[in-house]
Amino acid sequence: MKQMKDPNTKLTEEVLAEVLGNSFGAWKKFNDEFLKYDLRLEWRYYKDGGWLAKITRKKNTIIWGSASEGFFSVSFLFSERPHIRAGIQKLDISDELKNSLVSTPKGTFFSIAIDVYEESQLLDIYKLIEYKKSVK
């Protein structure tokens, strides 16, 4: 996907609509909703990854995002502490996400990544945003 790897691309709504295709409606809804969570989005270009969305609250990164052909991805990075993993397991999110957490190796940090194709997937993201904002 040349556009998302090109540092000269200006990431307009039109470019994102072209890249995301059918998932653009879910992106728009996500983009509108995260403002309610006091989050700010900034697209940044990284030589090793292309254009990535950094979504922050104050100085803390809450979500990393990227746009791919036909979908967008969001990733949450958490500090590795037992109470954090246990807290995520208690959330009312999909079993698929909970199961992915079980297979994630333990380290200093762990991540939860979601590829979003449709609006119905956004509910889990909103729950993870609230959780991420609340954990210390």
Image: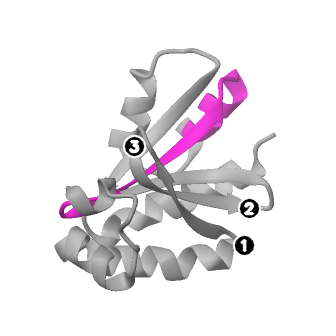
Q: CA distance from mark 1 to mark 2?
A: 6 Å
Q: SS class of the residue under badge 1?
A: loop
Left or right placement of residue 127 versus residue 103 in this view = right
Q: CA distance from mark 3 to mark 1?
A: 26 Å
Residue located farthest toward the top when viewing the structure as drawn: 106
**Marked residue nearer the N-terminal end (1 or 2):** 1
Check the image and report above or below for 61 versus 102: below
**Marked residue nearer the N-terminal end (3 or 1):** 1
Q: Which residue position is annotated with label 3?
A: 49
Q: Which residue position is annotated with label 2?
A: 57
Q: Which residues are magenta?
A: 67-88
State the residue at coordinates (40%, 58%). Answer: 7
Image quarter of the N terminus: bottom left
State the residue at coordinates (37%, 83%). Answer: 13
Q: Which residue position is annotated with label 1?
A: 38
Total labels drawn: 3
